[in-house]
Image (spheres, rainbow, N blue to C red):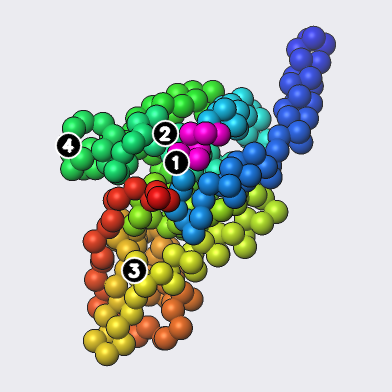
Amino acid sequence: MKRFFYLVLFLGISQTLFAQSFDHKHSVWDSLLKKHVKNGLVSYKGFISDGSTLNGYLDQLTKVTDANYQSFSEKEKMSFLINAYNAFTVKLILDHYPVESITDIGSPFSKVNLARGIPWKKEFFQLLGKSRHLDWIEHEKLRKDFNEPRIHFAIVCASIGCPILQSEAYSPANLEKQLQNAKLVFLKNPKKNSYDKKTNTLYLSKIFNWFQPDFTKKSTLIQFVQDGFEETIKPDAKIVYNEYNWDLNELK
């Protein structure tokens, strides 16, 4: 009985120490983003040249067990998952580089890959002790465990139509500011979202259509996006969803 007690105590202490020692600033990933991302465009060739550094960071993420993760605070968990999604997305592109779009990954038919979500359902990394895919991080963890619609502006699918990949890692200390900034930067991009006052038409990214339930839990969709527009959007505005650009978000 005593042995079991001491084992439980030891495991508890080990998990606490790991949680404290884990780099929640994600410094390595942060340095890579600052070096290889400019205005949301990614130098994948630059990431290839720093492949060993990227793999070292991914190894850090992989070593986090589910028990370790459970000892993280809510902001630590969210930052961990957002950074993991973005870093493994970059890894996915590098594994198949050169590609013109993430939708090229899978079968030879990009439309089939997109329709079936093949790139996002591909198990190619380990996280929290099991083989995972990108959809698992997004739909089974971030969307399910956190009531935070702004995560959709933080995770990036390596495409021009996506919110931009920020040139810094997400961190618990700055998470609220970073999420709000990501939301506003996305909304204020006229190529993705705009409002025509004369015709009372609101043109939005398809992200707002695909995940509308996430954005309308506490308000209408128009109320949710309003802080990204200088002009007041009329509540009866017609909403039109723009075509999504799946071209690779590559810095050339």
Give the residue furthest to the bottom.
Answer: 198
Q: Quadrant of residue 214?
A: bottom left
Task: Name the image quarter holding residue 223.
Answer: bottom left
Q: Secondary structure at mark 3?
A: loop
Residue 109: give its label: 4
Q: Is residue 73 in the magenta section? A: no
Query: Label 2's element?
Result: helix
Task: Give the residues in magenta.
Answer: 45-50
Mark 3 or mark 4, earlier in chain: 4
Residue at numbered disc 1: 44
The residue located at (49%, 25%) in the rendering is 126
- 1 or 3: tag closer to the N-terminus: 1
Circle on res. 191: 3
Q: Are marks 2 and 1 in contact (CB under 8 Å)?
A: yes
- Label 3 Cα neighbours within 10 Å, binned few <14 / some 14-19 / many ≥20: few
Whichever of callouts 2 and 1 sits on the residue coming sooner in the sequence is: 1
**Numbered marks: total:** 4
Query: Residue 42: horizontal and vertical position, in percent?
Result: 46, 48
